[in-house]
Amino acid sequence: MARYNDAVCRICRREGLKLFLKGSRCYSRKCAFERRSTPPGMNTMRRRKVSEYGLQLREKQKVRKSYSVLERQFRNYFEKAEQHKGMTGENLLRMLEMRLDNVVFRMGFASSRAQARQLVSHGHFAVNGRPTNVPSFGVKVGDRIEVRDSRRGREYFKVAPETMKAAQIPEWVSVDPSKLSGTVLAEPAREQMPLEFNEQLVVEYYSR
């Protein structure tokens, strides 16, 4: 599978928005976007009028890169969102939020989605007692996510309870730091999902 190996801070600069792709570093003075918020490349200071298509494209890229999803996979999510009842844009964001790597991130097991993706890929988590190493695994309401017993002795998970206690946990999940586990209580409502995204522009992009 293709993978982005360049500096992720360039993504934030390209989209003109801090996407918090590097976890705690994004909150510090070391954040590259804070030091240089202009888009990467030459002649970036020249102002250009952005077309309607350009706005739609940038919004689609912003959402896709924030969740670290490849283009074909993102398009598949959109097509599935169209088939569900309700607003397509909200359905799309909800499906992305219910990915296992994102739920692990929301529960405070990791400081960024990239770190959560790596933890899941290395097989550290189980869903309803079954080991799962697929970051795109779709979590459902009522599912229990926990660190596998064989991995709890590792140094990273010895300090994880403190990290989970300090994290901002959304209302649609509950966590038990002492047991290194969490449960999905409900599907996230729109106000519980990233408000900086304009999902309607994404819908318009794919509806051209």
Image: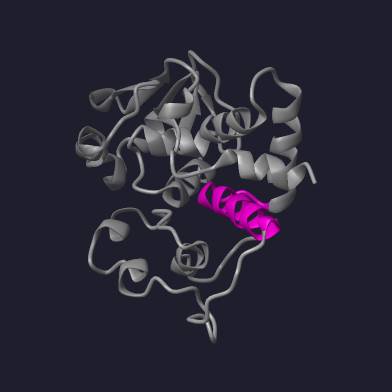
Q: Position of residue 21 (x, y in %)?
A: 42, 55
Q: Quadrant of the N terminus?
A: bottom right
Residue at (48, 13) in percent of width and height? 142
The answer to whether residue 73 shows anywhere in this view is no
Q: How many numbered callouts?
A: 0
Q: Is residue 190 toward the left or the right of residue 160 in the image?
A: right
Q: Is residue 152 toward the left or the right of residue 122 in the image?
A: left
Q: Position of residue 91 (x, y in %)?
A: 62, 27
Residue at (37, 67) in percent of width and height? 33
Where 140 falls versus 98 (above or below)? above
**Magenta residues?**
52-70
**On the image, which quarter does residue 148 sit in?**
top left
**On the image, which quarter does residue 2 sit in?**
bottom right
Which sits in the foreground, 89 or 26? 89
Q: Position of residue 176 (x, y in %)?
A: 28, 22
Where 83 falls versus 154 (above or below)? above
Where 158 falls versus 19 (above or below)? above
Q: Main secondary structure of the magenta part?
A: helix
Identity of the residue furthest to the right in this view: 208
Residue at (32, 37) in percent of width and height? 108
Which sits in the foreground, 130 or 191? 191
Q: Is residue 63 toward the left or the right of residue 81 in the image?
A: left
Q: Position of residue 99 (x, y in %)?
A: 55, 34
Q: Is 120 inside the magenta-drawn segment?
A: no
